[in-house]
Amino acid sequence: MSLLRLFLFVLITPVSGLVAYGENAPPAQTNPKPTPSLKVESGITFDWIHVDGPYIALTFDDGPSSKLTPKLLDLLAAHHIKATFFLIGENAAQYPDIVAREAKEGHEVANHSWSHPNFNKMSDDGVRAQLRKTDDAIKSAIGTSPTLLRPPYGNVTAHQKKWINQEFGYKIVLWDVDPLDWRRPGPSVVCNRIVKNTRAGSIVLAHDIHPGTIDAMPCVLKELEAKGFKFVTVSELIAMQTPLPPKPSPTPKSSPAPKASLSPKASVSPKAVPVKSISPSPTPQN
């Protein structure tokens, strides 16, 4: 009788287990979500542009300055050069006539926040307020809203980039040439750093609120023109973008011919050497 009960228990147990789980059965394991691709930033963030030709973009941050920006505008006009100005909203609201002049003379005007905070440490609502107030100040001065944003310090999260682009339509503009002019190293150092590091497609960072930077610009413009560079706004440079050429596939290294497998002491017959018959020496006596 006990054997029969044991047999019935073995038959019933798997079925009972399935019934016990019912709808609460653990789900089958699925593959984890893939890591977000960097392609999400494609067409949103720019620090250098691949272009066909010697085109570059000069950019100036933190203005306008009531004393220095007009001097810079005079210099750019003398060279027939267009630049891009990333404006602090507070300054744009204070000097709307300079902002209007920048736009009137063909320069590009863009958003650089209202008061230059670090976006990385701010809430979305805080960043939104910074951008909106600056956008309004620029639009009040020139009649249109900007299309570019340079985050202060270049600091912005991937999440912020995405919603800023979706909500404001801004492209995020960084740079690939930085003379560190905000440290005020002197006009000659600023000039040398810019001229040395600029290449086709470069976005050059500078600030039109430092006297040394303005003093460096005659040298910068002269030297870059001598190298054949042509100056455009950032939006014009982006519009010139061409695809990067594909990287050449690495040439596979030819594998060395396999060496013949040789058995120890047996693969190659030694050259026959005539051997003389030698009688064994007698065993020495003690």
Image (cartoon, helix red, strand yellow):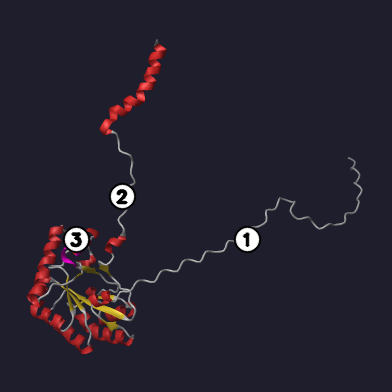
Quarter occupied by residue 233: bottom left
Type of amino acid under label 2: Lys
Q: Residue at x 29, y 27 (%)?
A: 19
Where residue 94 appears, as percent x and y from the top left, is: 7, 75
Q: Residue at x 23, y 64 (%)?
A: 155
Residue assigned mark 1: 257
Q: Secondary structure at mark 2?
A: loop
Q: Earlier in the sequence, mark 1 or mark 2?
A: 2
Q: Secondary structure at mark 3?
A: helix
Residue assigned mark 2: 33
Type of amino acid under label 3: Trp
Would you say residue 79 is visible in this rendering? Answer: yes
Between 281 and 254, the one lying in front of the other is 254
Q: Is residue 12 above or below residue 186?
A: above
Where residue 224 appears, as percent x and y from the top left, is: 30, 84
Q: Is residue 50 above or below residue 117?
A: below
Would you say residue 66 is visible in this rendering? Answer: no
Where residue 105 appears, as percent x and y from the top left, is: 16, 84
Do the CB atoms of the residues marked 3 and 2 lie less than 8 Å apart? no
Between 178 and 264, the one lying in front of the other is 264
Dot 2 crowding, Cα within 10 Å, few <14, some 14–19, many 20+: few
Q: Nearer the viewer, mark 1 or mark 2?
A: 2
Residue assigned mark 3: 163
Q: Secondary structure at mark 1?
A: loop
Q: CA distance from mark 1 to mark 2?
A: 45 Å
What are the residue bounds of the magenta stretch? Answer: 165-169
